[in-house]
Amino acid sequence: MNVINYKSHRFLLAALILMFWMIYLWTTAEDVYPGANHGELITASASLGITHPTGYPILTQTAHLARLLPIGDIPYRMNIVATTFTVLTIFLTAVILVKLGVDFFASLTVSAGFGLDFLFWQQATAFEVYGMHVFLSSLFVLAVISYWKTGKLSWMFFSYFMFSLTIANHLLSIFLLPFLVFIQRKHLQALFMSILFGILGLSSYLYLPLRASKPLLFTWGHPDQCFNFLRHVSGTQFQKLMLHTPLNDFFHRLELGYESLFVFPRNLLICFAVVGIIKLFKSSKRFFYGALISVLLSTFFALTYQIHDFEVYFLPSIWFLALFSGAGYHYVINQLQYWRKSIPVIILSLIVIFGITVNYPLADRSDLFIARDYGKCLLVSAPPYTYLHYQGDNPMNILSYLVCIEKQREDIHLHDLNQNISYSLPFAFASESTIHAGTYRGTAGDSTIYPHGIIYLKHQHLLQPPPADLFTIFRSNYLNREYADPSCHELVAEFCINRAEFECERGSWNQGIHYYFEALQHASNLPEVRQYVAVLLSRRGKVENAIHIENSLLKTGLAPPDSLNNLAFHLFISGKSYQKALALSEKACRLDPNNCSYLQTAARLSMSLGNLTKAESLLNRCRTVNSHLSWELEKLYQLTVTYPDHSMDVTSPDSLPELVLFSNKLYQQLQAQLMFLSTQRELNLHEMKMLYECTQKTGIYPGCIQLFEKYFGNESDVDSLREWLIVLHEKAGNTVRSEMLRTGAK
C-alpha cells in the first residue's frame, strides 16, 4: 500500500481531532485537581507569577491568555489549555508518521491509540506542563524530519529554535539532543545562525527576572537576582532527587512500568513497535538512533528520579513507542493478502471502542471537587491572623489557589513543613531561614500543629476541628468512592489522618484509631501514607500496631527506605529482636547512604549491641553529610535523650544486653557546645530544652541556671523557663530561689 496523499484525507483527520476534543472535554476537570502541581500552576498562570523550578515561562504566559475564554471558572479554562496541546499532539503524531512513510490510515490508527493511552489522556484533563512538553517535542521532531527530507536550512533553523523552546518548557527535553547531533552533519556553515535561533528560543526565560522584579501575587525563588535565576532555570532545588531512587524502589518502578505495558491499547502498540523498530532501522537510521537514545535516557531518568509522580516522565518514551508502532503497523498491513481494506477499519474501531471503555475510568476527572472541599476544611479550621502549617503538595496547591486567586482567608500565613518554604500574601517562596523568624514562637506558639495542614487552637484547652458540616460533606462525598488517581486516595487518607489526630488529642482513642485504619484503607497502594500512619500510631503508644503495618508493607515489596528505618526504630523501642532491627536499618542506609536519619538509627542500634566503633563511624558519616552546628545539636539531642538508659539484661536469650547509650562525658560535651552557642546568639526554645535535659544528666548546674535566669529576666518563654528553673534550683540545693519561683516571683 503506497503512502496516501495527506491532503485528500483532511475530512477524516478533522473527524478524528473533533472526536478527541469531545472525549477530552467530557472528562476534563472543572476545578483544581489534587495533582502534584496543578493548583500552583493555575495560580501562577492566572496571576502571571513564577512557579517552582524551572519556572515554565512558556506555559505560564500561554495559559494566562486562557483567562479570556468566556467559559467556566479559571481552573476549567486552564484545563482547556492542556486539552488543546494534547489534541494538537495527536495531529502532529499523524503528520510525523506520514513523513516517515506510513500510510495515512495507519497513521490515524496509531495516533488514535496513543491518544487513548491512559497516561496521555490524563494530561488532557488537568492543567500540567507535560501536555505542552509532548506537543513541543513532537513539533521539534517534525522539524528535524522535514529538514532530513528537504535539506532546507529554514527547517534546520526552526529545529534549533524548537529545541531551545522545548528546553525552556521542560528540562526533560534535553534527551532530544541526539536529533540535533544528526542534524549537525551537514551545513556546518549555518551553525552560527542555528545557535542564534537557539538563543531566541531560550530568551523566553527572560520572563522570570523581568516579572520577579515587580511586586507579584505568587512567586517562587526570587529569580530577579542572577544567582537565584541560574538556580531556578537549572532546577537546582530538585537536582538532589535525580539519580537518587533507592535500589528497591528502582526495581519496583521497573515492575510497575513493565505491568503498564499490558494496558490496552499500549499492549497493541508494543506488538507493532517491535516490527517498526526493525523497519525504521533499515529505512531511517538517523531517526532510529535519535529516538532509541531518547527513549533509553528518558526511561532511565523516570526510573531514577525520586518523586511520587514519576510515571508521567515515561510519556516521551510512550510517544516514540507510538511512532515505532506506526512503522510496524504499516508493514504488517501491507503483508496481508486478504481483507487489506477491511482489517484496518476493524482495528481502528476496536482501538477506539476498547480504548475508551478501558481507560475512561482512569482518566475521567470531570466530577471531582475533592481538592476544593479539602482546602475549605483547612482554611476554616485556622484561627484568624495565624499560621497554617502543612506538609505535602496537596494542601499547598489548593491553598495557593483559594487564597491567591479567589481571595479566601487572606489573613493567614502558610508554611510548608516538608519543603522548608514559607510564604504569605503576597506569596513568595523563601529559604529555610525565613521559617525561624518567629514562626514557632509568638503567633504560632498558641496553636498545636498537626500533619497535613489541620491547625487547632490550644489556648485554654480549646480544640477547633473542621466544622462538622464540612466534615460530613467530605465524608459522604469522597470517603466511600473509588478513585483511579493516587492523588485522590492520598488526599482522602490525609483527611482521615487529620480527623484521627483530632480525636486522639481530645481523648477519643478508639475513634482516633478507627480513623487511622480508615486512612490505611484508602492508602493501600501508597507506602508513604501507610508508613506515616505507622509513625503516628507509635507516637500514640500503639507500637505493636505500627510494627504490624510496617511488616505488612515490607512483605508487599513496596517499602521505601523510610519504612525500613521506622520498622527498625519501632522494633528497638519495643524491646524486640535488636539484630533484626539493625539489619533493617543497615539496609535502609545502603539504599540511601546519605540520609542522616537512617545513619542515626543504625548508630543507636549499634550502640545497643555494643558495637561502639561502628556507631562512631556512622555518626562521623552524619557529620560529613551535614556538619551544621544546629543540625548536630538536634541530632545529638535525639540520640542522647530520646531513650532512658537501659540496664544490663542477661536473662533474654534472644537479644544481646543493651549498653548505656551515651556516657556522662558525651552529655558534658553537648552541654558545653550549647553553652558556647549561647555566647554567639540567644538559644531558641528547643535548644534551651536540650540544655535543660543535658544539665540534669551531668549535674553541672551553675552555668545553665545563670543563663536561664538571664532569659527569664528578659521575659522569654516565661512559663517553660520557670518550670525548668524550679527543678534545677532544687537539684542544686537552692530551695529559697525555687520557692520564690513557685510563688510567681521574678
Image (tube, rainbow, N blue to C red):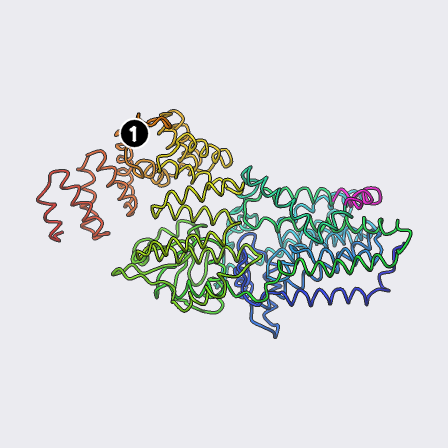
User: Between 380 and 725, which is closer to the camera in this rendering?
Assistant: 380
User: Between 384 and 309, which is closer to the camera in this rendering?
Assistant: 309
Q: How many marks?
A: 1
Secondary-structure class at tag 1: loop
Question: Picture coordinates of residue 738 (x, y %)?
Answer: 12, 45
Q: With 426 as the anchor, is 3 left or right in this view?
A: right
Which residue extends farthest right? 337
Per the image, is 353 magenta?
no
Q: Main secondary structure of the magenta part?
A: helix
- At a point 73% along the width and 56% down the height, the residue shown is 113
The answer to whether one can see residue 533 in this image is yes
Q: With 116 as the anchor, is 74 left or right in this view?
A: left
Quadrant into which the N terminus falls: bottom right
Give the crowd class for mark 1: few <14, some 14-19, many >=20 residues within 10 Å: some
Question: Picture coordinates of residue 164 (x, y %)?
Answer: 67, 52
Which quadrant of the view contains residue 484? bottom right
Which quadrant of the view contains residue 11? bottom right
- At a point 14% along the width and 38% down the height, the residue shown is 732
Which residue extends farthest left? 736
Q: With 683 as the anchor, is 143 left or right in this view?
A: right
- At a point 81% along the width and 65% down the height, the residue shown is 12
Q: Amino acid at mark 1?
A: Val
- At a point 44% along the width and 36% down the height, the residue shown is 625
Question: Picture coordinates of residue 177 (x, y %)?
Answer: 70, 45
Residue at which label 1 appears: 660
The stretch of residues the image draws in magenta is 274-290
Per the image, is 280 magenta?
yes
The answer to whether one can see residue 188 in this image is no
